[in-house]
Amino acid sequence: MQRYRRILVASDYSEPSMTAIGVAAAWAKALDAELELVHAFLPARYAREIMPGETDLPAKLKSAAVSELETLRKKCASDYPEAKLTALEAEHPATALCEHAEDVGADLLVIGTHGRTGLSRMLIGSVAENVVRHAKCDVLTVHPGAKAEVPTHLISATDFSPTAERGLAAAEHLSRAFGCHTTLLHVVDASLPALPVGAFADDDLTERKRHAWDALASLRAEQFQDRVDVATWVEVDPSPPDAVVRTAADRKADLIVMATHGRTGLASLLIGSVAERVVRHAECPVLSVRGQGVSDEPAAEIN
């Protein structure tokens, strides 16, 4: 069953968004999915303040936006000439992008980030932060420097929770579709207090690590049928997000896959705030896989 049939990529004409378009086009081609480039522009009343006397501004602004998208399609997605172009007049871009993705039945929304300085510096200001928090489809955040190609090695981070199963399912699908190597990763949180008696026999980190290795081996056997291109790895670290980012860098992974509840934004991502920090600091793209219970509340209305 094809997981991603319709892919949307947001653009604000910036360098990060151009990188995102290239990555989205590579994914769409490899997955035989539809591709749509979307730009949300401010309502005409804002333009009238600097262009008084202009007539039919909404149509002119939309035409200009589509023309810019056409240029980007030729430059960043030349091997996908059939990609659809959509310009949305929107007071609040994050809301418009999320609603449009839902209206057209998008399975994946791709958005670029500036990286390094956190979500507040993501593409289109705080718009990307709100898209990650509120979109009802999966979201792929693409950092600067990402290659316009499908991944060759993905890291699937799991805490063995029911929510994490959705991330693992996405990782399994992509590993087959792209033919890429996969590493199943669990981080034993060394900062946690002593475990109750009977949970893992005792509080010894070595014992907890052994149980994690066993659990990953079971996942590999059950979900990945013991494929030889699937590896398992356990880290022990008092900072799980740092461990995920470091492992991805050390193993030269070009995609991190994590699951999210999606109800209350990044604060409810898998492993607490781990995924939030991974999205902020990872050098490679991060796929946030949506789970059950995504909020019906619209994305925050931010200009």
Image (tube, helix red, strand yellow):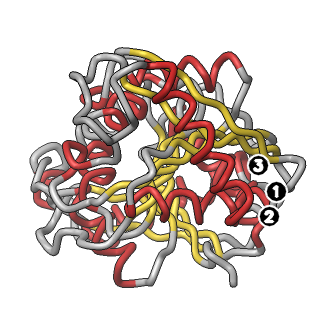
Instruction: Point out residue 283 in the picture as x, y percentages from the top left corner.
Output: 56, 24
Q: Amino acid at mark 2?
A: Gln
Q: Is residue 1 above or below residue 189?
A: below
**Pointer 2: what residue?**
225
Q: Residue at x 73, y 24 (%)?
A: 252
Circle 1 Cα neighbour tier, 10 Å, few/some/many (<14 / 14–19 / ≥20): some
Q: Is residue 219 left or right of residue 236?
A: right
Which quadrant holds residue 300? bottom left
Q: Residue at x 32, y 45 (%)?
A: 128
Instruction: Point out residue 61 in the picture as x, y percentages from the top left corner.
Output: 34, 61
Q: CA distance from mark 2 to mark 1?
A: 4 Å
Q: Which mark is residue 226?
A: 1
The front one of 216 and 230 is 216
Q: Residue at x 37, y 24 (%)?
A: 189
The mark nearer the N terminus, 3 or 1, is: 3
The front one of 174 and 243 is 243
Circle 2 Cα neighbour tier, 10 Å, few/some/many (<14 / 14–19 / ≥20): few
Q: Residue at x 23, y 72 (%)?
A: 293
Q: Is residue 239 above or below residue 43?
A: above
Which quadrant holds residue 137? bottom left
Q: Is residue 215 left or right of residue 297?
A: right
Whether residues under marks 2 and 1 lie with C-beta atoms below 8 angstroms apart, the answer is yes
Q: Amino acid at mark 1?
A: Asp
Instruction: Point out residue 70 in the picture as x, y percentages from the top left corner.
Output: 62, 60
**Pointer 3: what residue?**
150
Q: Amino acid at mark 3?
A: Val
The single residue placed furthest to the right in the displayed view is: 228
Q: Is residue 16 left or right of residue 226?
A: left
